[in-house]
Image (cartoon, rainbow, N blue to C red):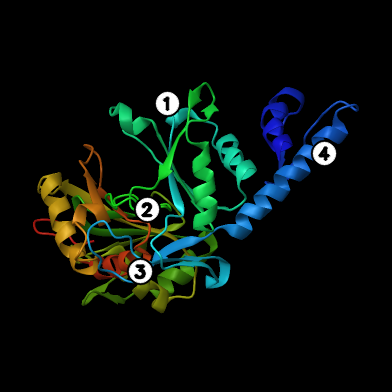
Amino acid sequence: MANVCCLLHMINRISKPTWEHKIEIHLFASSKDIEKVFGFVRNVLVCVKKWLRRECLEKCLHHGSQPGITLPVALFGAGAEIKHLELEHRYSTLDVSHSKGNSLDDKKLLMLFENLVSGVCGFHKFTGSGRDGEYNEKWGRIAFLTPDAAQKAVELNGVEFCGSSLNVAPARAYAGGDHRTSSFPAVRAKMFWPHRHSKSLAVVRFEKNDIDLIISDCSDILIGGRLLHCEISSKCMNSVIIRGLDREISKPEILEILRMATDMKILDLFLVRGTAVDDPPCGVCESELLIEISPFLPSHTPLSSCCYVKVFPPEPMDNFMRAWITFDGRLHLEAAQALHHIKGKVLARCLPW
């Protein structure tokens, strides 16, 4: 496996990657080095294949526990195969810190652990804000297939790596700390809702040769309880304009009706918007979103440990408000239920999405 680390540095020196159709990489080397490069590449592929086969999702078996007591977890591999079942509250995930946490060579660090103990089944790299020096030293978390493998990997604590010592310890969730960071990547959802009122006008784009058929199919179409007429756009010959729409009707509702009215392919649709809405402050929107989400999250864990909401202030020309919702990596089902519930909801003093 040591050769794999060498390849990470030799590629830039003796070869130049060339992408063709996004499925091939050509590495160029001298005749005396070609066999060595071939061996390195083969070892890399073997290692990556091994990691992909081991990759797991960690899932708590139930909710509710006493402070400082770790919940029993299962590691699920491909096809929901149970790779490991941990009922004895032993740790299988490690927190890794380094003075150059945000700039380390990730592959090289992972290979260091792989060389010591075979069993890496997942990792999650932290992203710091750039202000908290202690946080920026945290590289991330590495999960192993078994607690025995994780315990052996702790031997790397204090080992010099890239000019500084590694700090390797059981993940805080297993050591009785908080649960704000999962061993696996968080579940993130992006949300939008209108920042400007609709002008009751929609522009629908089709294939140019289909325009006459579209006008025929949609000459008198009922949308939102209103009988509307379509006309060809004077600015774009492959677009149709629909006027007189209800200001509250959404893009998905219009698309659903159009697809029922015609078999022609719809390339795009957008609602023309005008005056901006006086939206509530971002903090108020964040609180409203959390109120809608909280019933679906574990009640025994602080809400801030399960979910984080960030609403971004709109730019002057933005048509939509934007928000990110980040869920703990273990709460895939809960996140799906919360997002299904909130879809189509209208926040106080905001336009419907």
The disc, 2 or 1, on the residue closer to the chain's N-terminal end is 1
Give the number of the disc on residue 99: 1
Q: Is residue 50 left or right of residue 61?
A: right
**Secondary structure under the numbered disc 2 in the rendered image:** loop
Give the residue number, with chain letter if any, for mark 2: 182
106 vs 164: above or below: below
**Residue 303, image x and y in percent?**
20, 57
**Secondary structure under the numbered disc 3 in the rendered image:** helix
How far is the residue under mark 3 from the one under mark 1?
A: 36 Å
Q: Residues within 10 Å of mark 2 (few under 14, many from 20)?
A: many
Residue at image location 77% in from the left, 34% down from the top: 27
Give the residue number, with chain letter if any, for mark 4: 38
> Are dots 3 and 4 in contact, CB under 8 Å?
no
Q: Nearer the viewer, mark 3 or mark 1?
A: 1
Q: Nearer the viewer, mark 4 or mark 1?
A: 1
> Are dots 2 and 1 in contact, CB under 8 Å?
no
Give the number of the disc on residue 333: 3
How far is the residue under mark 4 from the one under mark 1?
A: 34 Å
How far is the residue under mark 3 from the one under mark 4?
A: 44 Å
Q: Nearer the viewer, residue 51 or 165?
A: 165
**Residue 16, image x and y in percent?**
73, 29
Residue at image location 48% in from the left, 31% down from the top: 158
